[in-house]
Structure formats: C-alpha cells, structure tokens
Image (cartoon, rainbow, N blue to C red):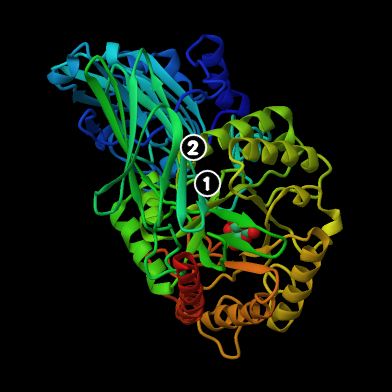
Amino acid sequence: MMASIQQVVFPFIVCLLHGFLICQGAITGGMLYAKESESREVKELNGLWNFRADKSSARDEGFTQKWFMQSLAKTGAVIDMPVPCSYNDVTQDRTLRDFVGWAWYDKEFIAPNSWGSTLNRVFLRFESAHYNTVVWVNSKQVVTHEGGHLPFEAEVTSLLNYGQENRITVAVNNTLTPDTLPPGTVTHKSDTKRYPPGYYVQNLQMDFFNYAGIQRPVKLYTTPLVYIDDITINTTISGSTGIIDFSIAHISGAVNVTVELFDAANQLIAKYSGTKGKLTVKNAKFWWPYTMSDTPAYLYKMKVNVSSSGVHDIYRLPVGIRTVKTTDKQFLINGQPFYLHGVNKHEDADIRGKGLDLPLVIKDFSLLKWLGANGFRTSHYPYAEEIMDLCDKLGIVVIDESPGVGIKTLENFDNTSLAHHIEVMTEMWRRDKNRPSVVMWSVANEPNSKASVAGPYFKSVIAHVKSLDPTRPVTFTIADMPFPPQLDQAAQYVDVLCINTYYAWYSDPGHLEVITLQANNDLVEWHKEFNKPVIQSEYGADTIPGFHVDPPLMFTEEYQVEFLKNYHAAFDQLRKDFFVGELIWNFADFMTDQSVTRAVGNKKGVFTRQRQPKASAHLLRQRYQSLINDTLTNCNKHNNIVKSNTIL
Ligand code: GCB
C-alpha cells in the first residue's frame, strides 16, 4: 500500500479543519429503530450502489476534487457494490480487499411526492458503516459519524427533491488509529530498499478481519413534524406483578402523549397519559430465556401515541418484563439462578464479510437452537438490530459487547480514547437499552488490565455505563491468563468476572491433561479474590475440519473434542458454586488478518465458516441439550411453586 500514516489520516484532519466534518460531539436525542406505523413510512435504500475506492496516494482525491458534487460515475470508473455488504471480498481485486482509506459510494433514488408535505419530516438512517463516515445528500453534507457498529441518522427534509431524483454520496474510511474502537496503528515503512516509496501497513490489535464499507441497511423514513424521539423503559417485578417504568421524549411543540400496553393477543391491558409513568401488569407473563420456561420470551407491545393539533405519531415497542441481578455467586434472571451455556460469535461469513444477510442470520439462530445454546456475547462489537430483535423474540440472552477490543497501549488509554469509548457506550446503550435479551454490558474484550492506567480508565467507563443503566451488570473480559488476580487493576469494577483462557493451546500447547486442573485453580482463585460470579467467556482450539489424528494432536477434530471435555469437567465442578456460564470460542470459523498463526482465518469454530458442524459441535450439542433439560426441570418446579404461592 502506498501513502504514509500522516497521508491517510491527514485527509480526515484536513476535512475537520475545513469544516467538512462537524463531529457530533455529545450525544443527544434518541435512535429508535426505523419502522413503519400509521404515521411513519420507511423506504430502504439497499441494493447496488456505485462504488469507488480512492486509491490516490494520499487517499484525498475524493475530497480535493469534491466527488460529492456530481454523480460518482462522472469522477472516474465505478463498480457495482451491494449494500449492505463489506466491500472487501466481493471482487477479485486484492488491493480492494486490503484497501485502507476513503471508499466512496453513491446512489440515486426518487423521494416520493407524497413525502413533500410540510407536515412531514424525513430522516436518512445508516444502521452502521465502518469506520468514519461522511454523508451528502444532493451534494450537501448532512452527517458524519465515527465508529463502525452503531446507527446514525440525519434529518434531510429540506434537502430532498420530492417526486424527483436525489443522490446520496457516502465516503467511509476504515483506518484504525490508537484512538478508534477497536484501536489500531498504521506503520510507515520508509526503507525504500525494502518497500516502495510511501508504503504503509495497517496493524490491527484484534483477531478479526477489518471488514469495511456500508455493512448494514440504509433507510429513509418519515415522521410527522411532532414526533416520538426516544422511549426508555425499565421493568421491575413484585410477586406476580410486572411494572414498566417509562419515559418518552418527543420533538416538539405542545402535545398529548398516551401510552398503551397490549398483550401478545393484542388485548389492551394498561394505559397511561403523560411522558413519564408506570404501567402495572397484574399476573404478568415474564420474559424468560427459552431454557428457563416453557413459555419463554413473552413480549408485550407498548404503543406510544404523541399528538398535536390532531396529527399523531405512533411507535410500537416490544417490551419484555424481566429483572437481572447478580450476587457474589449467582446471575439471577427474574430472581432465578441463570446458567449461561452459549457461544461467542462474529458477524462474519464468506463473500459478504460483515454485511447483514438475513438468510445467514436465520441459519445462525437455527444452529443456536440445534446446539441448545441459550445466549451469546456479541464479540467484539454490537450486532445488527435485526439480530437483537430475534434474541428478544426467541429468548436468547445477550452479553452486549462494545467494540473496545485490543485496548493495550498507553495511547489506547489516553483521554481522547476514553472520551470516545464513553461516547460509544452511550450510543450502544441508547440503541439497546430497552431490549430484554440484553442482560449485561461488556465494555471491552481483553484490555491490558494489568496496566496501572487500566484502573482509572475502566473505573470511568464502567461508572458511566452504570450511570446510564443502573439495572444491568457490567463486565469486560479478562485475558492473557494465567496471571495472579492481584495484578489486575480493573476487575474490581465489574459485576461478573468474565475470563478468557486457552490452556493447552496458547499456554502448554498440546497438553490436554493440564486443562481441568488449571481451569479449576484459576477460576477458584479469581472468584476468591473478587467475590463475584464467574463466566468462562472464551475457551477454544483451532481445528481444521477433516483433520483427524488419534491420539489427538493440535488442530485435529479429536483434539478440539478432548479439549472441550477437559474444560467441561472443571465447569461441572464449579457450576455448583460461583460459576455461572460458559461461552465457547467460537461458534463458527471467521476471517482474520493474514498471519503465520492463522490458516485462512481463525479456525476455532465448532461450525465451519459455511456453518457445517465439526465433531465438537455434536459434543457441545449433547452437553447443552442436557443442561436445558436440567434447567427446565428445576425452573418449572420453581415457577410452579411461585405460582401456587401467588394464588395462596
Ligand atoms: C482471544 C480473543 C479473540 C481471539 C481468540 C483466539 O482471546 O478475545 O478475539 O480470536 O483469543 O482465537 O486467539
């Protein structure tokens, strides 16, 4: 690759100076998922867009030549690019796969004539684009966003030509720096005997490919002038009664607000007038993970109606009534001990990279059910809302993880990084705060938590999340084990210790016989030090499907099976005490950067990247299905007792 770090990052800074980019700063307003109602219309802008990577040496030609002023095809050669999709793997062009810098998209569309009324507003929404994004509508800049996995939007009412063609132009830059999340660096190789002039490389601090582009859907949606901007709910339980505290934010003017609650059969069961209040549900049906109840994942529907001078805005929010709490040894859902037997995932598959693909999403949920997994961690970034919706609906529990993966160097802990991390956590909370499936926030994966700076850094990030959401536990995953817990500077601030270990893999490679002993000792020691429940948040072994050796050798299917069995032996001893969950690394194989330790990506999946089972998937299935049987028997026993107590 050509051009230096200064050159790659520079255009972004130049844009800032010239006012191209007005960074959003403090987060205001809501980010309700764009959906249709009696008062709202949605138009998806997915499909084929024009695409052009700016391969100029400083990656700045798009800005200096103002590509956004005309259709992209007039600025040079364009190719068709699907949206949503990562741009990296869809062509045969290696330089596009490994491209670092600004990539440009544009699309023309008709804004419906009917939207042109003065009573309407129109918003343009991106469910995500990776990483820094600038958006123009009809050559006018409308929004910028920093961060690759969360939605952003802008009102474009006055910029559209109704009943005519309009053009959206998007520039998106995937460069990772010490202050981005995830962080990365760019190294300039100045030795011209070894590298061409201006050669640089992007270094990643995470173990997954830096897929880029417009990876989630793009939508236009309408609202009336006075509209519902945000809804925040919190649910509590008292005996068999469910209580929903809510607050509604609306824009703008004098309005009436009514909130109605419907059950799953669409019967009205509670009603309230006002922007802030409580809805009380007697004999409520609670939201349970599907492994804890024969009637899991019960969702009520909250209908919010904001009206002004006879014009209504209506939004429907699914609501699950449930509580989450931790003690020193337990993770409680609705007051009942919950044991998490699930997976870590990636939003990753062939060709489309991290582009949202509904057939793949449904396949993954079907495999989760087949396995008997009752939850997952969104390793290592927030997943698409379409995925989160299914978790709410199906009773799959989620540890919602931020893109704070690989925070290792001093710069990654500086004030700029901290401010950005806090902003990302706010965006993530704002998007996912009402989801019953989200039972814990994970602020980071495997930071250098032994560094002295990690203490104050994570104290601030975790305190910030708790100030936004006092109801859910907060964690980060601890890495580079084994090390004595006394050396850790940040674990003291979490509610649940999430521990990643790779015994007999990265440590003592090949020695399966040490796993059970080491897992037992370390997990007990960490619990003892911090007196908090513990989850094994990662454990796994790379496995090339079809490799067989007996007795097992590393990388064979036999080794992965034995590896898991040895871990499970430790889990089964500790489950009786403080051990509340196990998450295999990983659900499926996934792409990484090229390295001598990765044979076409990370192969620790129990499924291949094409979602076919390795031998380990069958073992895991047996284990998880029998854990479900245990849990359901216990829970139903308990729920019956609760029910009969209530009747008495
Ligand atoms: C880890 C990381 C994960 C890697 C995994 C591995 O600890 O959290 O992102 O992919 O190890 O396979 O090395």
Q: Is residue 595 visible?
A: no
Contact check, label 2 and label 1, Cβ < 8 Å: yes
Viewer-nearest residue: 563 or 478: 478
Query: For the point 45% across and 43% down, which residue is it?
Result: 244
Q: Hey, what amino acid is under mark 2?
A: Gly
The answer as to whether callout 2 falls within 8 Å of ligand 1 is no
Viewer-nearest residue: 130 or 81: 130
Look at the numbered disc 2 and give the secondary structure of its residue: loop
Percent across and percent down for residue 569 are 65, 82
Up/down of 304 relative to 389, above or below = above
Q: Earlier in the sequence, mark 2 or mark 1?
A: 2
Residue at image mark 2: 148
Would residue 188 appear left or right of 614 to someone viewing this image?
A: right
In which quadrant of this rendering is ligand 1 seen? bottom right
Percent across and percent down for residue 497 are 70, 58
Residue at image mark 1: 381
Query: For the point 36% across and 36% down, which residue is it?
Result: 33
Would residue 470 appear left or right of 157 to someone viewing this image?
A: right
Percent across and percent down for residue 332 are 59, 61
Query: For the point 36% across and 55% down, which residue is it?
Result: 393
Q: Residues within 10 Å of mark 2 (few under 14, many from 20)?
A: many
Q: CA distance from mark 2 to mark 1?
A: 9 Å
